[in-house]
Image (cartoon, grey):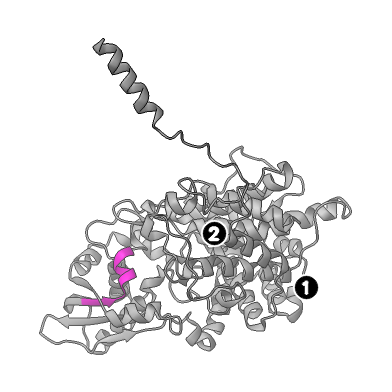
């Protein structure tokens, strides 16, 4: 009797539960952010002369950085096809080499070369990044489609010019940079190449002739994709992946764009906003993207982009290196040297403390070019900082670590404030050096690197010099190929040149 009563009580209890309703399977509209991106890519015409002129400089600077990377053995190895000797019909040619690849592998190769030396452009906001990384996807796809059009008599593909490349660079810069202004991906542990993947997917999809709805589809897959962690950029795990992460991102973007074109893979309309399963809830602490500084896409980012001109150094340290080279000159004028230094106080921005302030051993090239103490110590000793100065051979000088150990980093709050100020976007650093005899040198303070918009007139001739230097170092000083590249890029009608013809000029003869 007792057992029967107990069973009846349990039945009544269960019957009082409300049966959960099934998930309401109503297909939502595309997320607003993605819809705005695709609308911008399809419908916005770039009318800013400043943006296009800057894009031209950025294009050549980025090409030069890719050529310079080929001096490094690991960079040459990582871009090789998985199957040796693979040649793709009408394939894209990889700059500075004799490799011919499909657009996906070509994107990985070009994207990796562009980024290898950490010498291409930079954007600093809530999220950091290098928008010219997107050229790694834009250039191979446009080159391949142009060659395909020629091979098929215009039945497939399309002829693209340098101007088309520049316009798509402006748009890719804008997408990545505007998303970065108020949204910190690094604070949730994600690497900025998620934005490279998204921006490249959007513009490459348009190069492929996809509609606005198809671009929504491709971009939704870029967001739902597994995203890179920043682990490989920070101590104690800094390594070479930071040099090819953008290459991997643009290759993935090109692949997703082609999957959308060829297989109609279907949009994930609420990929950002879906409860529990969407990007915001899973990866962004439940917060939607913020657009406080700018809510529309235009050409702002390209107009304000930062160039790395003087030093292949992580951008937060550019002004610190400039200050260190000045300090080297001051010491020489005093008949002193780095050996007379007792201590160095590095005043910097908060972002630099989070990314490049390192104590202890440095294990590889990537570790060194992301260590502010190394990037200051080397020019204090030698009066220079070049790409080869991060090599194992050059880093073997024990005096470098002796000097590093005399350094202390601290935040200068005005540098941090001005860093985030949209009217300034400074990247300030200063050095206070005390000598063994008690002398304290005047503080050397540099707030804006030479690649900043505020120093653009000073920087433009140096950008051209940097490009010419990289071209000559790769192909040789007195060379017809060098003369052809340099002469054609200086002409006013360079922008009308069909892109495959320019890529042919860059191929290794």
237, 3: nearer the viewer: 3
Tell me the quadrant of the picture where the N terminus can be found: top left
Q: Which of marks 1 and 2 is in front?
A: 2
> Which secondary structure lies at badge 1?
helix
Regarding residue 508, the answer to whether it shows in the image is: no
Q: Residues within 10 Å of mark 2 (few under 14, many from 20)?
A: many
In terms of image quadrants, where is residue 17?
A: top left
In terms of image quadrants, where is residue 160?
A: bottom right
Q: Are marks 1 and 2 in contact (CB under 8 Å)?
A: no
Q: In this view, does 284 lie to the left or right of 195?
A: left
Residue 496 image label: 1
Q: Give the range drawn in magenta.
A: 345-356
Where is residue 471? Give x, y as percent.
Answer: 59, 68
Q: Residues within 10 Å of mark 1 (few under 14, many from 20)?
A: few
Is residue 352 found inside the magenta-colored segment of the image? Answer: yes
Regarding residue 380, the answer to whether it shows in the image is: yes
Residue topped by disc 2: 196
| Residue that sits furthest to the right in the current view | 153
> Which secondary structure lies at badge 2?
helix
Q: Which residue is drawn at 35% across and 63% down?
A: 370
**CA–CA distance in space, label 1 to label 2:** 27 Å
């Amino acid at each position: 009797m007792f057992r029967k009563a107990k069973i009846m009580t349990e039945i009544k209890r269960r019957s009082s539960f409300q049966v959960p309703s099934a998930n309401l399977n109503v297909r939502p509209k595309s997320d607003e952010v993605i819809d705005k991106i695709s609308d911008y890519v399809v419908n916005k015409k770039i009318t800013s002369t400043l943006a296009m002129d800057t894009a031209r400089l950025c294009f050549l600077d980025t090409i030069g950085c890719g050529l310079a990377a080929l001096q490094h053995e690991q960079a040459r190895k990582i871009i090789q096809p998985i199957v040796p000797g693979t040649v793709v019909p009408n394939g894209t040619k990889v700059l500075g080499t004799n490799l011919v690849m499909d657009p996906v592998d070509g994107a990985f190769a070009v994207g990796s070369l562009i980024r290898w030396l950490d010498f291409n452009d930079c954007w600093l906001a809530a999220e950091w990044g290098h928008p010219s990384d997107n050229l790694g996807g834009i250039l191979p796809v446009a080159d391949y489609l142009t060659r395909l059009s020629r091979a098929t008599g215009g039945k497939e593909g399309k002829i693209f010019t340098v101007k088309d490349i520049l316009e798509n660079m402006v748009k890719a810069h804008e997408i990545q940079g505007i998303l970065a202004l108020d949204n910190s991906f690094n604070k949730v542990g994600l690497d900025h190449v998620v934005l490279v993947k998204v921006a490249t997917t959007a513009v490459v999809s348009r190069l492929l002739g996809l509609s606005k709805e198809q671009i929504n589809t491709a971009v939704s897959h870029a967001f739902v994709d597994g995203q890179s962690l920043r682990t490989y950029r920070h101590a104690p795990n800094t390594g070479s992946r930071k040099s090819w992460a953008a290459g991997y991102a643009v290759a993935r973007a090109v692949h997703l764009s082609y999957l959308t074109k060829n297989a109609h893979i279907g949009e994930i309309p609420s990929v950002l906003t879906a409860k529990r399963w969407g990007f915001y809830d899973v990866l962004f602490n439940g917060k939607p993207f913020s657009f406080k500084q700018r809510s529309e896409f235009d050409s702002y980012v390209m107009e304000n982009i930062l160039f790395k001109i003087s030093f292949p150094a992580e951008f937060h340290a550019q002004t610190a290196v400039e200050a260190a080279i000045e300090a080297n000159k001051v010491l020489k004028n005093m008949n002193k040297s780095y050996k007379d230094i007792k201590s160095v106080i590095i005043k910097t921005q908060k972002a630099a403390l989070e990314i490049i302030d390192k104590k202890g051993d440095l294990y590889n090239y990537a570790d060194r070019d992301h260590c502010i103490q190394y990037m200051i110590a080397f020019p204090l000793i030698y009066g220079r900082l070049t790409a080869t100065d991060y090599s194992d051979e050059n880093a073997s000088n024990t005096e470098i670590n002796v000097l590093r150990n005399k350094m202390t980093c601290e935040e200068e709050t005005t540098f941090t404030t001005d860093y985030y100020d949209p009217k300034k976007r400074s990247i300030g650093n200063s050095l206070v050096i005390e000598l063994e005899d008690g002398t304290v040198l005047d503080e050397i303070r540099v707030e804006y690197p030479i690649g900043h918009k505020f120093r653009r007139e000073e920087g433009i001739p140096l950008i051209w010099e940097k490009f010419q230097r990289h071209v000559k170092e790769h192909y040789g000083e007195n060379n017809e190929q060098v003369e052809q590249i340099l002469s054609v890029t200086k002409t006013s009608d360079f922008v009308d040149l069909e892109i495959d013809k320019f890529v042919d000029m860059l191929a290794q003869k």
